[in-house]
Amino acid sequence: MKDAAGTEHRVFVDAVARADGKLVVLGWSSSAIVNIDLLQGTTKLPAKLSRHARGDVAEALKLTSGDTLGFCVLADIPVSKAALEVSVGLPNAKPYQSGALGEVTGLTNLQRTLIPELLESKIADLKAHEVGSVEWREALAKLPEAQKAPAGFHGFVEGIFVSPEGNGVVFGWALHPEGAPVWLEDELLNIYPIEVSFRRERRDIAEAFKSILWSDMEAAFITHLPTSSKNPTIKLRAATSSGVVTLSERSGAEMLPSDPRGVAEKLFAIETEDRNFQRRANIIDWPILQPVIKRYREELATIVPRVAKFGAPPETPAVSVIIPLYKRFDFMEHQMLEFCRDPFLRSNAEVIYVIDDPEIRTAVLNEADHLFRLYGLPFKVISGLRNRGFSGANNLGADHANGAHLLFMNSDVIPISPGWLEKMLEAVEDDNVGAVGAQLLFPDGGIQHIRMDFEYLDYFNIWSNNHPGSGMPPLAATAPPFEVPAVTGACILIPRPVFDQIEAWDTGYLLGDFEDSHICFAIRAAGYRVMCQPASTLTHLERQSFTGIGGDAFRMRMTICNAVRHYNIWKEFLEPHSDPDVADTDLQQDTDA
């Protein structure tokens, strides 16, 4: 047909069909100014006209754009059986009527994607069911597959890690309207909803798509896969007004290392701000790390340690002094010198060094032989042949200990004068005492540790161990033992029966942190008190024995990760974080120090 100026306009009807309770007319026109009405006899039916892109029409007709050349007329199905026709109208021109239109049976999936109104109820039905459920999958099957996402839907799967334990993580970003059904789908059609993934903002995505209203949403995602093949294919999918669309697809994965540290290094490299890491650790990192740590511990249990004895210690020692060695061992002689000066220790204790670093084993054994020849104090050296961590090394030492009490000591803790061990034993004589810590000082004489309590760090959203009194003058040597919430593991005495009752040091943390407060909480949970003995004073060269863990970023994430586990296990001791009866003991400080 031609308009008033004589310009020819072309209109073509592709399909007339009944679908989902609606009458649908699909077609195209050579100009978007053409108006389409639906008639039945002489009656104009109430209908909605919408436009969509038809690039094929623009190409065939050599037009500059086909963005609005397609049309869809949508109306309620009329009661009358009379024939249907379309009325084509142009400005200042007489309408053209097509004549009777023949109906087709149903629409193709491609045609359905051109009619968003038909999908609204189906998407609402999808949202009404739990993602991945049978009902959800049945609703999903009623939606057509779309070749192209509508405006505002974007996403990309950036990477996939698979653990040797059979689970994994997927990470990337997804931009979509709030509440839109978006999920990950693997090659076995397992469904992982984005809504339960860890999400965070991505400023680069917000900037790249700033014209989209929801560009500042938490677009980044990290998703835990409870099960995964070694070579998965992961699709990022969405249910949209055009149908179900695949926003991104990625095949293949990077296999994570078999050791906990290697796994942590890979996971922690997935970008997340420190302030958000606590929120992520529970749902992403620990589900991957926990089975790796468990399997690693099981492997360590099969390794037969090697024992080197230097001299003959007491046959029935009152206490076993257990000292792990990691990376450095140059304080051994300082300790040995002070041990030799202590008559009580010489007569009543066995000393056990535990090599927790295979790289220093030969050097430590050479040094041990030299120190025994020089000082003559009997001791033994246990080599676990693998790194077990602080708790694991302590437990290995306890396995080879014969003492009625176990004194766990860092390799950089140096006694100041004889009698310290005897005083600690006196403080644990009461049957309801399960652990005793010492007063530890910095080299300059200020307090490094007299007790441990706990503080909530708002920025990181974690409970952290705190050492009140740090840097203050030391407590008087005459001050009596006092009850505390916890003591540091740098110097802690535990009766052997109590140690066995709580089933030793917990080895479930990642490379350390919180193990000392954990064992104190376990002791308190078993009904015992934890005490500090200020009369037992030693120097602690803090962190000198704890090196080689990693850079600041890795250590921060490790600490947050461990704080999350610590809280999950011991929430009742952290909220409130201390017992009023043990929190604020009034103590006399030694002003002469």
Image: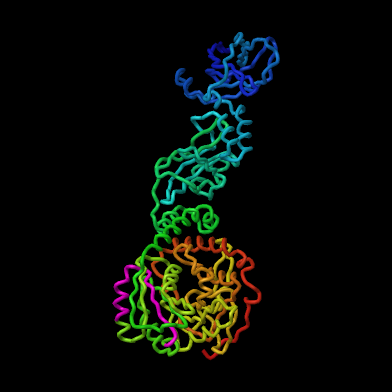
> What's the magenta bit mostly, secondary-structure-wise?
helix
Image label count:
0
Q: Is residue 489 above or below residue 113?
A: below
Location of the N terminus by quadrant is top right
**Quadrant housing residue 4:** top right
Magenta segment, which residues?
347-369
User: Can you give x and y, in whole percent of width and height, for residue 590 in the image?
Assistant: 55, 88
User: Can you give x and y, in whole percent of width and height, for residue 445 in the image?
Assistant: 48, 84
- Tell me, what colour scheme is on the image? rainbow
Nearer-the-camera pick, 348 or 559:
348
**Quadrant housing residue 379:** bottom left
Q: Is residue 446 above or below residue 514?
A: below
Can residue 565 be seen here? The reply is yes
User: Can you give x and y, in whole percent of width and height, for residue 495 in the image?
Assistant: 52, 77
Nearer-the-camera pick, 489 or 90:
489
Q: Is residue 235 above or below residue 533?
A: above
Extreme top residue here?
A: 99
Is residue 183 located in the magenta-colored stretch of the structure? no
Q: Name the residue located 56 percent from the left edge and 72 percent from the top edge.
A: 523
Nearer-the-camera pick, 120 or 261:
261
Can residue 211 be seen here? The reply is no
Nearer-the-camera pick, 244 or 355:
355
Is residue 365 located in the magenta-colored stretch of the structure? yes
User: Can you give x and y, in whole percent of width and height, for residue 468 in the image?
Assistant: 56, 76
Residue 88 as seen in the image, left or right of residue 312: right
Extreme front residue here?
A: 315
Q: Name the residue located 44 percent from the left edge and 48 percent from the top edge.
A: 166
Q: Is residue 223 above or below residue 449?
A: above
Residue 414 as seen in the image, left or right of residue 524: left
